[in-house]
Amino acid sequence: MNSIITQVAVKVVEEISKNIEKNGISEIGKTAEDILSILKEGTLELLAAAIHEMDSAILSAKHERKQDGITVKARNVPRTVVTSIGELKYSRTYFEFKDGTKAYITDQLIGIEPFERLTKELCAELVHNTASMSMQKSVDVVGIDVSRQTVNNKLLSMRDVVTEITRESHTPSELHIFADEDHVHLRPKQSAMVPLVTVTEGIDISNDRRHRTKSPLHFQGYGMEINAFIENVVAAVYRKYDMSAVKRVVIHADGGNWIKKLGALMPEAVLVMDGFHLEKYFKQLFRIKGASVYAGNLRRSVRENDIERFTKYCTAIKKGQDEKDKKKLEQLLSYFQNNWESIVERLKGEHCGSCTEPLISHVLSERLSRSPIAWSKEGLSKMAMLRVYEENGGRVTAKSIRVSRRKTDREKDYRSKRNGFEIYNKYANEQIKAVFGGNHDWSIFEGESKNTGLCYSKITGTTVMLRSFARLKAV
């Protein structure tokens, strides 16, 4: 083996020397590219030689193979695998085992799976790139000859990549949660909502030019039952922080029912209307004919927490409107009334600014909905998961890559995700066990539904436990 390494090294040095003698280094950039190309070719040649040595060693072990009942079926079977530095071409032996199964032992030893044309490391790099750029650009950046459909197939067959939560040594007295959803185009001519929840320790305003969230942790729930998604988030928060030390959880949102349900499972939760959405609804209200003259009074009614006066002004505006504007006014009034407390909280000015829209834009929309692209359900599920995972500091590795699956297998995985991510469900089960010592039976609750005042939801053991925690903390 050492002699092979020496031969390849000598050959590489000779080729580099010849290149410099012939072309010089007046164009240093081109010279660097030429030398890199020579090094890549030498590396591939070295790898092919090493694989050949490995395969030869297996062939030479005739006594050991005979004892194990392994016979040779075919020799020097060619194989080409695309790596990040080019095509690796080598030959290996096809063996048959005593039970009748057949395999390329050498392929198994070097981590190459049957029918796989790309190395897992290369696939991981392609998938990582596509989190921030188009699939074609991902191919161009890596510089290999594969199609964008190949990159899409690797994305679809990727294992679930989820941020593992570690316990913080220090828990702040106040947590801030920003919740909203992105609206994405699906094929054919459909749309989907991707909920996003970001848990932070507040806003860092030390830089006047750019405020930042402190220790953000993102969660997305596309493809999940909304209750499962909420329980995943809450279980992860309890895993990360000592919630008995948290005096208040401030939830910034637009008033969606699923977000209110999240607040019901958080101790000492305060719902605060997101400033962007509040201004959007105020502007819609003021654009109705005759409403602009009441703008100051309407805002003052909210700041002074006088819902009766606010309703009175809206009633006055309603007079003389056509049916279309009356209906619009009724919808807006209903929105303000249903979210009155959170709107008042926002206008009190006691809370940090809300950044739900920037978070949606940065974490999801930048890749999912900003460009004119339509996703499949499976593709959207994987890409939303990938975006959040990498925003949380993760990086796709070869362990996350597996051989492409059939469409039916992908659909099965997509359906199973409705119950949430396995690792977060595990956190919830551990928390239940820690509290009740395993002496509990939730079967009497399973399958039942309860009107929470927001919407009907299935009751699970996790839901019971989380609601109990929230109530105990409030006592």
Image (spheres, rainbow, N blue to C red):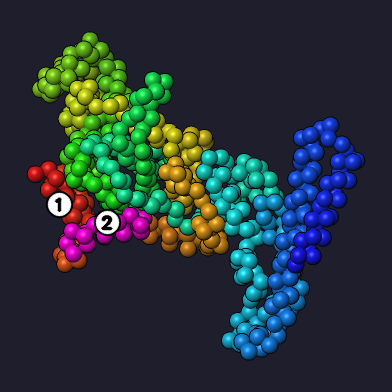
- What residue sits right under mark 1 in the picture? 468
70 relative position to 22: left or right: left
Residue 23 appears at what percent x and percent y?
88, 38
Amino acid type, mark 2: Ala
Residue 402, by quadrant, is bottom right
222 relative position to 98: left or right: left
How packed is label 1: few (under 14 Cα within 10 Å), some, or many (20 or more)?
some
Q: Is residue 126 magenta?
A: no
Is disc 2 placed on a helix, strand or loop?
helix
200 relative position to 432: left or right: right
- Label at residue 428: 2
Residue 42, by quadrant, is bottom right
Residue 472 position (above or below residue 416): above
Q: Is residue 423 magenta?
A: yes
Q: Which residues are magenta?
A: 419-437
Is disc 1 placed on a helix, strand or loop?
helix
How packed is label 2: few (under 14 Cα within 10 Å), some, or many (20 or more)?
many
**Residue at 31% of width from left, 49% of height from top?**
167
Query: Does residue 366 appear anywhere in the picture?
Result: yes
Residue 271 appears at what percent x and percent y?
21, 34
Query: Does residue 153 appear anywhere in the picture?
Result: no
The residue furthest top is 293
**Residue at 71% of width from left, 73% of height from top?**
55
Amino acid type, mark 1: Ser
**Residue at 44% of width from left, 39% of height from top?**
364
Residue 418 appears at what percent x and percent y?
35, 55
**Residue at 24% of width from left, 44% of height from top?**
262
The answer to which of marks 2 and 1 sits earlier in the sequence is 2
Residue 372 position (above or below residue 381): above
Asked if marks 2 and 1 touch (Cβ < 8 Å), the reply is no
